[in-house]
């Protein structure tokens, strides 16, 4: 005996319209279309998830690079400040001594360069007090006419005036040393400000 009378019949519609049954080919097409839609949606979800993951990784990498950069700059600033006494002695003692020792040589070199442009013209070197002998000893014998070396008490150590014919040149190593010292002091000031703003 059949129990079909107990089960609801889905083949007939309640409003009396004819039921449209699908054959195997149409059913297979619907299955393929559903598969394609699901496959495409899966790809879209995977791409969206990968973009979100990539965005998170990019943000984390950027933050890490900022931290490393900040740490590097902070370390360099602290190292520079720890070396301040060494730099101060370099600028305040060693550089001036080197400049003093090379002062006479540099003046004579510049004089010889100027003499090449104005051959046979009278030459004059004005140097600070106590420097004339050192300068005179370095003047080449072949330099003609022999330059006149004059001491000027108004000149500071590291300063000189050169004249060959109508060409003139001033040398001021003390101004150069002052410029270097000011630049270093400014750098140290900025480094200290950067550390105090942390």
Image (cartoon, helix red, strand yellow):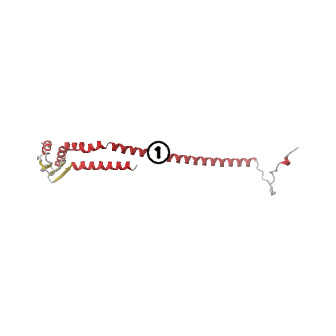
Would residue 133 appear left or right of 61 to someone viewing this image? left
Q: In the picture provided, is 13 more to the left or to the right than 143?
A: right
- Observer-nearest residue: 78 or 127? 78
Under tag 1, what secondary structure?
helix
Q: Quadrant of residue 16?
A: bottom right
Counting other residues with Cα less than 10 Å from the Cα at mark 1, is it few (<14), some (14-19), or many (20 or more)? few
For this orientation, the residue located farthest to the front is: 196
> On the rendered structure, is 95 left or right of 149?
right
| Residue 125 drawn at (x, y percent) | 14, 49
Q: Which residue is depicted at the point 17% across and 53% down? A: 167
- In the rendered image, residue 13, in percent from the top left (x then y), is placed at 80, 54
Which of these two is toward me, 164 or 106? 106
Q: Return the x and y of residue 131 as percentages of the image width and height.
A: 14, 45
- Residue extending farthest to the bottom is 15
Task: Give the residue at x 58% y 47%.
Answer: 49
Could you tell me which quadrant the N terminus lies in? Answer: top right
Marker count (numbered): 1
Question: Mark 1 = which residue?
Answer: 64
Which of the 4 image quadrants contains residue 82? top left
Decide which of 53, 145 is in the foreground and name it: 53
In the image, what residue occupies the spot 85% across and 45% down? 3
Please state the horizontal and vertical placement of residue 138, each as a whole percent of the image: 15, 42
Front-most of residues 40 and 23 = 40
* Residue drawn at 31 percent across, 44 percent down: 84
């Amino acid at each position: 005996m059949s129990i079909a009378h107990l089960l609801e019949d889905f083949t007939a519609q309640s409003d009396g319209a004819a039921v449209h049954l699908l054959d195997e080919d149409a059913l297979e097409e619907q299955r393929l279309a559903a598969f394609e839609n699901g496959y495409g949606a899966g790809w879209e979800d995977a791409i969206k998830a990968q973009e979100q993951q990539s965005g998170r990784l990019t943000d984390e990498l950027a933050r890490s690079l900022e931290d490393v950069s900040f740490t590097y700059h902070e370390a360099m600033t602290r190292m520079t400040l720890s070396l301040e006494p060494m730099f101060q002695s370099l600028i305040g003692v060693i550089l001036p001594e080197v400049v003093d020792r090379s002062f006479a040589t540099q003046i004579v070199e510049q004089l010889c360069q100027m003499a090449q442009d104005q051959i046979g013209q009278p030459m004059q070197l004005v140097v600070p007090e106590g420097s004339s002998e050192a300068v005179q000893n370095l003047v080449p014998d072949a330099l003609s006419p022999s330059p006149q070396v004059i001491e000027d008490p108004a000149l500071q150590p590291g300063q000189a005036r050169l004249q060959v014919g109508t060409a003139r040149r001033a040398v001021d190593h003390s101004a150069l040393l002052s410029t270097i010292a000011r630049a270093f002091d400014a750098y140290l000031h900025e480094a200290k400000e950067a550390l105090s703003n942390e």
